[in-house]
Image (spheres, rainbow, N blue to C red):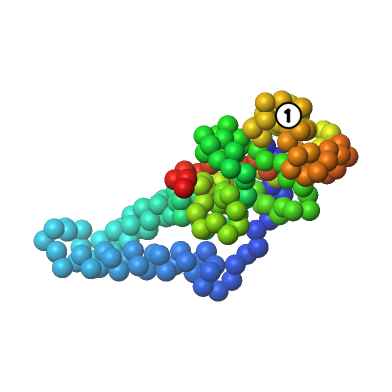
Protein backbone atom coordinates (compact mmCIF):
# COMPACT_ATOMS: atom_id res chain seq x y z
CA UNK A 1 0.00 0.00 0.00
CA UNK A 2 1.05 3.52 -0.66
CA UNK A 3 0.92 6.17 2.07
CA UNK A 4 -1.78 8.81 1.72
CA UNK A 5 -0.08 12.15 1.09
CA UNK A 6 -3.12 14.32 1.83
CA UNK A 7 -3.16 16.23 5.10
CA UNK A 8 -6.36 16.63 7.11
CA UNK A 9 -7.80 20.11 7.49
CA UNK A 10 -7.81 21.30 11.11
CA UNK A 11 -11.30 21.70 12.54
CA UNK A 12 -12.24 24.83 14.48
CA UNK A 13 -14.85 25.60 17.12
CA UNK A 14 -16.97 22.87 18.70
CA UNK A 15 -15.72 20.30 16.18
CA UNK A 16 -12.08 20.71 17.16
CA UNK A 17 -10.39 17.82 18.95
CA UNK A 18 -9.28 20.11 21.81
CA UNK A 19 -12.86 21.19 22.59
CA UNK A 20 -14.21 17.62 22.24
CA UNK A 21 -11.49 16.23 24.54
CA UNK A 22 -12.02 18.98 27.13
CA UNK A 23 -15.77 18.35 27.14
CA UNK A 24 -15.16 14.60 27.45
CA UNK A 25 -12.84 15.18 30.44
CA UNK A 26 -15.39 17.44 32.18
CA UNK A 27 -18.13 14.85 31.64
CA UNK A 28 -15.80 12.17 33.03
CA UNK A 29 -15.19 14.22 36.19
CA UNK A 30 -18.92 14.92 36.59
CA UNK A 31 -19.63 11.19 36.42
CA UNK A 32 -17.20 10.57 39.25
CA UNK A 33 -18.69 13.45 41.30
CA UNK A 34 -22.07 11.78 40.87
CA UNK A 35 -20.78 8.74 42.72
CA UNK A 36 -19.49 10.82 45.64
CA UNK A 37 -22.76 10.05 47.42
CA UNK A 38 -21.32 6.62 48.08
CA UNK A 39 -18.63 8.15 50.33
CA UNK A 40 -18.14 5.06 52.46
CA UNK A 41 -17.18 3.11 49.33
CA UNK A 42 -14.39 5.52 48.39
CA UNK A 43 -11.53 6.04 50.80
CA UNK A 44 -9.37 8.25 48.55
CA UNK A 45 -11.05 11.51 49.43
CA UNK A 46 -13.06 13.81 47.23
CA UNK A 47 -10.41 15.66 45.20
CA UNK A 48 -8.15 12.65 44.48
CA UNK A 49 -11.25 10.66 43.54
CA UNK A 50 -12.40 13.35 41.12
CA UNK A 51 -9.05 13.64 39.36
CA UNK A 52 -7.98 9.98 39.41
CA UNK A 53 -11.47 8.71 38.62
CA UNK A 54 -11.94 11.39 35.98
CA UNK A 55 -8.62 10.56 34.35
CA UNK A 56 -9.36 6.80 34.34
CA UNK A 57 -12.85 7.38 32.92
CA UNK A 58 -11.44 9.77 30.32
CA UNK A 59 -8.79 7.28 29.19
CA UNK A 60 -11.37 4.48 29.03
CA UNK A 61 -13.74 6.58 26.93
CA UNK A 62 -10.89 7.68 24.64
CA UNK A 63 -9.92 4.03 24.08
CA UNK A 64 -13.51 3.22 23.15
CA UNK A 65 -13.63 6.20 20.78
CA UNK A 66 -10.29 5.18 19.24
CA UNK A 67 -11.54 1.62 18.71
CA UNK A 68 -14.71 2.92 17.08
CA UNK A 69 -12.74 5.19 14.77
CA UNK A 70 -9.95 2.81 13.82
CA UNK A 71 -12.23 -0.15 13.26
CA UNK A 72 -14.79 1.90 11.39
CA UNK A 73 -17.69 1.03 13.71
CA UNK A 74 -18.55 4.59 14.63
CA UNK A 75 -17.64 6.22 11.33
CA UNK A 76 -20.20 7.84 9.14
CA UNK A 77 -20.18 6.75 5.53
CA UNK A 78 -18.33 9.09 3.17
CA UNK A 79 -20.41 7.89 0.24
CA UNK A 80 -21.38 4.88 -1.80
CA UNK A 81 -19.47 2.37 -3.89
CA UNK A 82 -21.76 0.64 -6.39
CA UNK A 83 -21.27 -2.99 -7.37
CA UNK A 84 -23.10 -5.33 -9.75
CA UNK A 85 -25.18 -8.12 -8.11
CA UNK A 86 -22.56 -10.75 -8.99
CA UNK A 87 -19.97 -8.99 -6.82
CA UNK A 88 -21.95 -9.02 -3.54
CA UNK A 89 -20.60 -12.32 -2.19
CA UNK A 90 -17.12 -11.61 -3.55
CA UNK A 91 -16.99 -8.33 -1.60
CA UNK A 92 -18.56 -9.75 1.56
CA UNK A 93 -16.19 -12.71 1.74
CA UNK A 94 -13.02 -10.79 0.76
CA UNK A 95 -12.60 -12.49 -2.63
CA UNK A 96 -12.79 -8.99 -4.13
CA UNK A 97 -10.58 -6.42 -2.36
CA UNK A 98 -9.91 -4.12 -5.31
CA UNK A 99 -12.20 -2.34 -7.72
CA UNK A 100 -11.05 -0.59 -10.85
CA UNK A 101 -13.15 2.39 -11.95
CA UNK A 102 -12.94 4.98 -14.73
CA UNK A 103 -11.05 8.02 -13.50
CA UNK A 104 -13.83 10.45 -14.32
CA UNK A 105 -16.41 8.64 -12.18
CA UNK A 106 -14.68 8.23 -8.83
CA UNK A 107 -13.46 10.46 -6.03
CA UNK A 108 -12.58 8.00 -3.29
CA UNK A 109 -10.23 8.79 -0.42
CA UNK A 110 -8.01 6.35 1.44
CA UNK A 111 -9.00 6.02 5.08
CA UNK A 112 -12.69 6.72 4.42
CA UNK A 113 -15.60 4.34 4.96
CA UNK A 114 -18.07 3.75 2.12
CA UNK A 115 -21.34 1.85 1.87
CA UNK A 116 -21.31 -0.92 -0.75
CA UNK A 117 -24.65 -0.93 -2.56
CA UNK A 118 -26.29 -2.35 -5.66
CA UNK A 119 -27.81 0.99 -6.70
CA UNK A 120 -27.82 4.64 -5.68
CA UNK A 121 -31.50 4.53 -4.72
CA UNK A 122 -31.09 1.42 -2.56
CA UNK A 123 -31.65 2.09 1.13
CA UNK A 124 -29.60 -0.83 2.31
CA UNK A 125 -25.86 -1.40 1.99
CA UNK A 126 -24.68 -5.00 1.71
CA UNK A 127 -21.31 -4.12 3.31
CA UNK A 128 -19.30 -1.24 4.78
CA UNK A 129 -15.88 -0.83 3.21
CA UNK A 130 -12.76 0.89 4.50
CA UNK A 131 -10.83 2.22 1.51
CA UNK A 132 -7.17 1.46 2.24
CA UNK A 133 -5.54 2.86 -0.92
CA UNK A 134 -6.48 4.76 -4.07
CA UNK A 135 -4.12 5.19 -6.99
CA UNK A 136 -4.11 5.76 -10.75
CA UNK A 137 -2.93 3.32 -13.34
CA UNK A 138 -3.31 2.77 -17.08
CA UNK A 139 -5.58 -0.13 -18.00
CA UNK A 140 -2.73 -1.73 -19.94
CA UNK A 141 -0.53 -1.71 -16.81
CA UNK A 142 -2.93 -3.71 -14.62
CA UNK A 143 -1.39 -6.90 -13.30
CA UNK A 144 -2.78 -10.41 -12.95
CA UNK A 145 -2.77 -9.90 -9.17
CA UNK A 146 -4.91 -6.74 -9.43
CA UNK A 147 -7.30 -8.54 -11.78
CA UNK A 148 -7.57 -11.44 -9.33
CA UNK A 149 -8.16 -9.08 -6.40
CA UNK A 150 -10.90 -7.46 -8.52
CA UNK A 151 -12.66 -10.83 -8.61
CA UNK A 152 -11.64 -11.88 -12.14
CA UNK A 153 -10.12 -15.29 -12.78
CA UNK A 154 -7.50 -13.83 -15.11
CA UNK A 155 -6.44 -10.59 -16.78
CA UNK A 156 -8.23 -11.72 -19.97
CA UNK A 157 -11.46 -12.21 -18.03
CA UNK A 158 -11.00 -8.77 -16.46
CA UNK A 159 -10.55 -7.25 -19.95
CA UNK A 160 -13.78 -8.90 -21.17
CA UNK A 161 -15.71 -7.69 -18.11
CA UNK A 162 -14.32 -4.15 -18.51
CA UNK A 163 -15.27 -4.03 -22.22
CA UNK A 164 -18.79 -5.29 -21.40
CA UNK A 165 -19.27 -2.73 -18.61
CA UNK A 166 -17.64 0.34 -20.20
CA UNK A 167 -17.89 -0.29 -23.94
CA UNK A 168 -14.24 -0.83 -24.87
CA UNK A 169 -10.79 -1.77 -23.63
CA UNK A 170 -8.29 1.06 -24.18
CA UNK A 171 -4.89 0.13 -22.67
CA UNK A 172 -3.90 3.82 -22.50
CA UNK A 173 -6.99 4.84 -20.49
CA UNK A 174 -6.13 6.03 -16.98
CA UNK A 175 -8.25 4.38 -14.28
CA UNK A 176 -8.52 4.60 -10.54
CA UNK A 177 -7.66 1.47 -8.55
CA UNK A 178 -9.45 1.38 -5.19
CA UNK A 179 -8.25 -1.07 -2.55
CA UNK A 180 -10.62 -1.79 0.34
CA UNK A 181 -11.47 -4.20 3.11
CA UNK A 182 -14.93 -5.00 4.44
CA UNK A 183 -15.69 -3.73 7.95
CA UNK A 184 -18.91 -5.62 8.41
CA UNK A 185 -21.49 -7.60 6.57
CA UNK A 186 -25.11 -6.65 6.09
CA UNK A 187 -27.90 -8.97 5.11
CA UNK A 188 -28.69 -8.99 1.41
CA UNK A 189 -32.30 -8.70 0.40
Rendering quarter of residue 163: top right
Residue at 62 percent across and 44 percent down: it is 84
Residue 125: image x %, image y %? 52, 51
| Relative vertical location of residue 4 with respect to residue 22 in this rendering, above or below | above
Q: In which quarter of the image is the N terminus?
A: top right
Q: Is residue 181 visible?
A: no
Would you name the residue on which mark 1 appears? 157
Numbered circles on residues, count: 1
Q: Residues within 10 Å of mark 1 (few under 14, many from 20)?
A: some
Nearer the observer, 81 or 86: 86
Residue 169: image x %, image y %? 83, 38
Q: Is mark 1 on a helix, strand or loop?
A: helix
Residue at 23 percent across and 68 percent down: it is 34
Residue 36: image x %, image y %? 19, 66
Residue 109: image x %, image y %? 66, 52
**Which residue is at the far left?**
40
Rendering quarter of residue 179: top right
Along the horizontal axis of the image, is 80 left or right of 146?
Answer: left
Nearer the observer, 183 or 157: 157
**Which residue is at the far right?**
172
Q: Can residue 17 be seen in this view?
A: yes
Along the horizontal axis of the image, is 104 left or right of 90?
Answer: right
Amino acid sequence: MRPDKSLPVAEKGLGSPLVRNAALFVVSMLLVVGFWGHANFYSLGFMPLVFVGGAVTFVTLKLIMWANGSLGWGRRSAGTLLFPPGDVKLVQYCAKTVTVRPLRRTRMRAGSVYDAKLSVVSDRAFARLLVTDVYRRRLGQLTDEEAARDGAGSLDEFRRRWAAAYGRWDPSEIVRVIEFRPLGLSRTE
